[in-house]
Image (cartoon, helix red, strand yellow):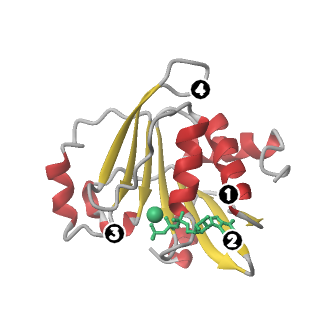
Amino acid sequence: MSEAGIRETGIDAAVVLHLPDADATGRLAQALARTAPTPAVVHLHGDLGAGKSTLARGWLRALGVTGAIRSPTYTLVERYSLPMGPLPTGEALHLDLYRIGDGAELEFLGLDDADAALWLVEWPERGGASLPAADLHVALAIEGDGRRCELQPMTLAGRNWLAQAVAQHELAAL
Ligand SMILES: Nc1ncnc2c1ncn2[C@@H]1O[C@H](COP(=O)(O)OP(=O)(O)OP(=O)(O)O)[C@@H](O)[C@H]1O
Ligand SMILES: [Mg+2]
């Protein structure tokens, strides 16, 4: 989906940030992980190298994933069991649909019954209708030496989440 498309269908104003380096992308991931509702579906938009995986990795680490975080480039999906604690628990899914041939392939991943606490989806525009609708769109783009990041809430849960993150100055502190 184009950025314009995201804006058209969003339910509230987008928050736009500049992330000067990869550490800033990691801090954004922490801020969003700490305030996310359960379940939360996040679509990560951006060209190759925009920083989608960096954000997903930082997010999973913030939720306490300590083992290897593999890129789902070839497996399409990696599943994580989140540790018990104050942050969302249950299962987290990290998808990268860049190499998917057809949205229908998603059915073969056995995700239809997935009751995940968190979906982090790279290249969601390739997933078709079987992908759950996003609460939050994150659009990353190269801007100078860093990245431009647009956070667009798509549901009421997403709107409340972003408002909470901003109100707690989680994003302002970046
Ligand atoms: N805010 C930032 N400023 C500068 N570099 C960044 C920033 N965030 C991430 N990077 C760097 O961008 C590079 C590519 O990141 P990443 O692999 O996360 O991209 P991607 O969007 O997942 O790409 P792909 O579509 O190929 O999976 C990495 O070297 C990462 O360190
Ligand atoms: Mg990636």
Q: Secondary structure at mark 4?
A: loop
Q: How far is disc 2 from disc 4 in space, using C-alphas?
A: 27 Å
Judged by depth in the image, the label closer to the viewer, 4 or 1, is: 1
Q: Is mark 3 within 8 Å of ligand 1?
A: yes
Q: Are marks 2 and 3 in contact (CB under 8 Å)?
A: no
Circle 1 packing at 10 Å, graded few (<14), some (14-19), many (20+), is many
Question: Which tag, 2 or 1, sits closer to the chain's start?
Answer: 1
On whether ligand 1 comes within 8 Å of the CB at mark 1, the answer is yes
Task: Tell me, yes or no, whether the two marked residues, 1 and 3, touch with CB atoms within 8 Å.
Answer: no
Q: Which residue is mark 1?
A: 25
Give the secondary structure at mark 1. Answer: helix
Q: Residue at x 56, y 57 (%)?
A: 54
Specify the amino acid type for callout 4: Leu
Which three-letter amino acid code belongs to the residue tagged 2? Arg
Measured as percent of width and height from the top left, residue 84 is found at: 51, 18
C-alpha span from label 4 to label 3:
29 Å
Label number found at residue 78:
none
Residue, disc 3: 98
* Closer-to-camera residue (25/152): 25
Q: Which mark is residue 87?
A: 4
- Residue drawn where x is 40% and y is 66% of the image: 123
Crowding at dot 4, Cα within 10 Å, few <14 / some 14-19 / many 20+, comes out as some
Nearer the N terminus, badge 4 or badge 1? 1
In the image, what residue type sits under mark 3? Tyr
Circle 2/circle 1 CB separation < 8 Å: yes
